[in-house]
Amino acid sequence: MTAPLIEVRGATVLRAGRRLLDDVSLVGRAGELTAVLGPNGAGKSTLMKLMAGEMAPDAGTVCIDGTPLARLPARHAAARRAVLPQSSALAFPFTVREIAALGLEVPGFGLSHGEITAMIGAALAAVDLQDHAGRTHDALSGGERQRAHLARVLCQLAAGERATGPGILLLDEPTAAQDLAHQLRVLEVARAHADRGGAAIIILHDLNLAARFADRMLVISRGQVAAEGRPAEVLTAEMLAEVFGVRLVPGTVPPAGTPFLLPQMAERL
């Protein structure tokens, strides 16, 4: 088994007397896409902030390539992992091309003009914004804005990979504002990154998309790990009932070839 590119070990986060996370562990390995699932308020985004370095755990550690993230120089961490949060605000009317280029501004990348141009072009094509490169941020739809920032993340990953090898892609609900076709495109981008030898960790609410694209799943409920493993091991009727409070409507059967269930086949307990 390959060594983890990123690992969360027994992370606990306390805020205002509440345990947002309680002894949570996660491993992101080269070649794997991990989906993090759970109800609203379960602690998924808190876990993402730990991996991004935006927050430090009150107990436990987060390691990249075996080194605690807290000890990594910011420049090295930026070369190893790139993060797409749920939302990204901009105060100026940057164009799509300029937003993507922000991912290449990390000191030490040392890229030539030709490399920069190629990386930006590849990132915009990957997120289906190659025809919108000159449009400004405020002229984009919500989904297009999200994909413009994904292009920035992909540029950062590409530059980091050139320096240190395939890195870590962290996405927090990247399909939330996307239409169906672009939901698939975003997850295909993440899948392709893992297939090239990187690690991808994605927070998702759509269990069917998670089942289709993920190698492993981590389910969080009330700040604790409720289930972990391969999709077939995690997506059970017991987990659905315990974590999400839903069950299959009696008499319904998922269609042949469907990895899990359709929303209309579930009901609240």
Image: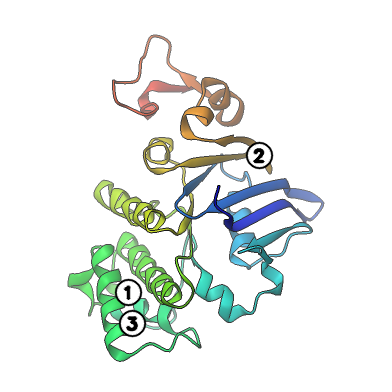
**Label 2: which residue?**
225
The numbered mark at residue 4 is none
- Residue 5 coordinates in the image, percent (x, y): 56, 59
Is 207 in front, or is 138? 207
Note whether 62 is above or below 217 in the view shown: below
- Residue 19 coordinates in the image, percent (x, y): 76, 48
Number of numbered discs visible in the structure rendering: 3
Q: Nearer the viewer, mark 2 or mark 1?
A: 2
**Label 1: which residue?**
138
**Label 3: which residue?**
98
Instruction: Name the N-terminal-most of marks 3 and 1.
Output: 3
Instruction: Give the structural element (helix, strand or loop) at label 1.
Output: helix
Q: Nearer the viewer, mark 3 or mark 2?
A: 2
Is 164 in front, or is 269? 164
Residue at position x 70%, y 71% from top? 70
Cα distance in 3D space between marks 3 and 2: 39 Å
Labelled pair 3, 2 in contact (Cβ < 8 Å): no
Q: Is residue 178 left or right of residue 29?
A: left
Looking at the picture, which amino acid does disc 3 mark? Glu
